Amino acid sequence: MLKILSGKQVKTLDAAHIEFNGITSLDLMEKAALAFVAWWKTIPLNDALQIHIFCGAGNNGGDGFAIARLLHQSGRVVAVFKCFDELAKMSPEAFSNMEKLPSEIQQKVWSEFDPDSDGILIDAFLGVGFSGRLRSEAVEVIQRINSFAGKKVSVDIPSGLPSDELLDGPCVEADYTATFAFPKLSLLFPEHSQVTGEMVLLDIGIGDEEYSRFSGSCFFLRENDIAGVHRKFHRFSHKGDFGKILIVAGSKGKMGAAILSCTAALRTGSGLVTSLVAEEERQIVQISVPEAMVTFSLPQDLSKFDAIAIGPGIGVGRNAELLATIFKNYTNPIVLDADAITILSQNPELLALVPKGSILTPHLTEFDRILGKTENHQDRLAKASEFCQKWNLNLLIKGANSVICLADGRHIFNSSGTQFMATGGAGDVLTGMLTSFLGQGYSEERAMICGVFQHGLAGEIAGRKKRRGTIASDIIEAIPDTFVELGIS
Ligand SMILES: NC(=O)C1=CN([C@@H]2O[C@H](COP(=O)(O)OP(=O)(O)OC[C@H]3O[C@@H](n4cnc5c(N)ncnc54)[C@H](O)[C@@H]3O)[C@@H](O)[C@H]2O)[C@@H](O)CC1
Ligand SMILES: Nc1ncnc2c1ncn2[C@@H]1O[C@H](COP(=O)(O)OP(=O)(O)O)[C@@H](O)[C@H]1O
Ligand SMILES: [K+]
């Protein structure tokens, strides 16, 4: 899995990669610029002929000069705006790439830029080398960039955004950020969505193994991480191998939650799914999900279930007792979602009873309910580590780039998903998927890795056709396609 390094570690990573591969830092910068231009050709902005590139004096600016040359070579009209006054301040690589600019490319000073121009702006002013508070001229450069009405694309990171910290000052407000090698931590914070725009990760040939010598507890989960984590089943596998699970979900007026979780679990591969619901609500489950069995009281022997989920749509009324009974009679990890999380926050004495290794899946409001009010993602992640270690539990903080927080302190950021999943019931689907993988014999970590990634991928597949019209049932429909896309039988 790709490790997320700090901004300060980038120089050492680059230097080690350069030495190991016998290349120069200019070669690496060229790879970065080539990756950027290859991606550029795939986006809608590609048609724009007039491109304004703001270049700083460091290597981020160096990328900008190289990108200018490559875009010019592919027929675009490019103008470069220099954001520094002295050549002496330039990094050798930036200087070298500036020298390579063909004479047809106009070179101007940033203050000559007319924000009413047509076209697209590329922000290669400041990258991960930015630190401290912005100097006053840098603030003016950023203001000028932001006064441009057209689309803005940031190279590596929006200029002014610190790589690992919260934004605390002016920053380029990008429509796209194309980041190199690994996503900088701050690009994954929801409070920065206004400045990062769409994020894309560009490969510049640094292998995952090259990160292993760096310390760090944050990781980025990508498609190629998934296949190796899955269990293999064989032609004699029977439904018992695929797990028997119990889903405690739904209540009067919220039976959809039970239906969505159970169907998602079946579509994820569960062998046998039992749904615990009130007797008067049985028909809707039996008609909507005939493959699921229904029970009306908590079975005496819970150990016959390979996994249990509790929470979606159960209501917070009288269920604290039910939670306590399950916790006392079941030793395997449980998936706790939605109302179960709220009940835990109202009855904190129950926390000590939750089976070790259980998975709590709060969205941001539920997170604050159970862990206390948080101001931002940095604060949230720190609190999550403390909570998971203290109780030996796992948290899945849901949202864009959902974060798997493990009891050993690791944080794994998901890369799949789309805003089209911001629709009622999408979380119930995830609960069903996580429980299904646990029931199929996956460890909590593996169940979360496969569950969260494939849930996001299913959302992407559904969203490709249905865009903002995507509903939770469409995500369920797409779960089998995720096995096909990932080559998993
Ligand atoms: N060979 C390499 O090292 C590679 C570097 N890459 C690029 O290089 C970037 C990092 O380059 P650098 O380390 O040179 O750093 P940057 O170019 O990100 O930043 C250094 C520049 O920022 C200015 N700066 C720093 N703090 C400031 C402040 N508070 N106010 C105003 N200006 C400030 C410095 O004066 C300097 O001009 C990455 O973000 C990436 O874009 C990529 O080309 C990949 C390869
Ligand atoms: N903008 C987004 N990008 C990616 N995933 C998203 C986005 N919005 C929501 N999701 C995903 O959809 C699910 C929503 O869950 P939740 O908030 O519990 O919804 P509900 O309670 O309606 O089921 C989560 O898994 C979340 O990660
Ligand atoms: K930048």
Image (cartoon, rainbow, N blue to C red):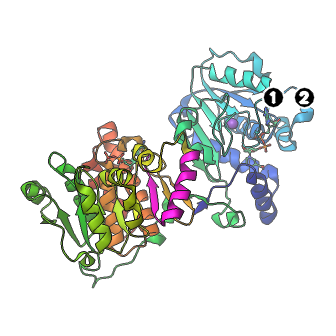
CA gap, disc 1 and disc 2: 20 Å
User: Residue 52's mark?
Assistant: none
486 sits to left or right of 431: right
Question: Which span of residues is magenta-colored?
Answer: 378-399
Q: Are marks 1 and 2 in contact (CB under 8 Å)?
A: no
Residue 92 sits in which quadrant? top right
Q: For marks 1 and 2, give the one nearer the viewer.
A: 2
Q: According to the image, label 2 marks what residue?
A: 86
Which image quarter holds the C terminus? bottom left
6 sits to left or right of 442: right
In front here: 219 or 371? 371
Point out the quarter of the image occupied by ligand 3.
top right
- Is 224 included in the stretch rendered in magenta? no
247 sits to left or right of 17: left
At label 1, counting other C-alpha atoms closer than 10 Å, the crowd grade (few under 14, some 14-19, many 20 or more) is few
Q: Residue furthest bottom?
A: 236
The amino acid beneath tag 1 is Ser
Q: Residue furthest right?
A: 88
At label 2, counting other C-alpha atoms closer than 10 Å, the crowd grade (few under 14, some 14-19, many 20 or more) is few
Which residue appears at 60% of the width and 60% of the height? 2
- Is 385 included in the stretch rendered in magenta? yes
User: Residue 103's mark?
Assistant: 1
Residue 205: horizontal and vertical position, in percent?
A: 67, 58
Which image quarter holds the N terminus? bottom right
The rendered magenta stretch, by its main secondary structure, is classed as helix
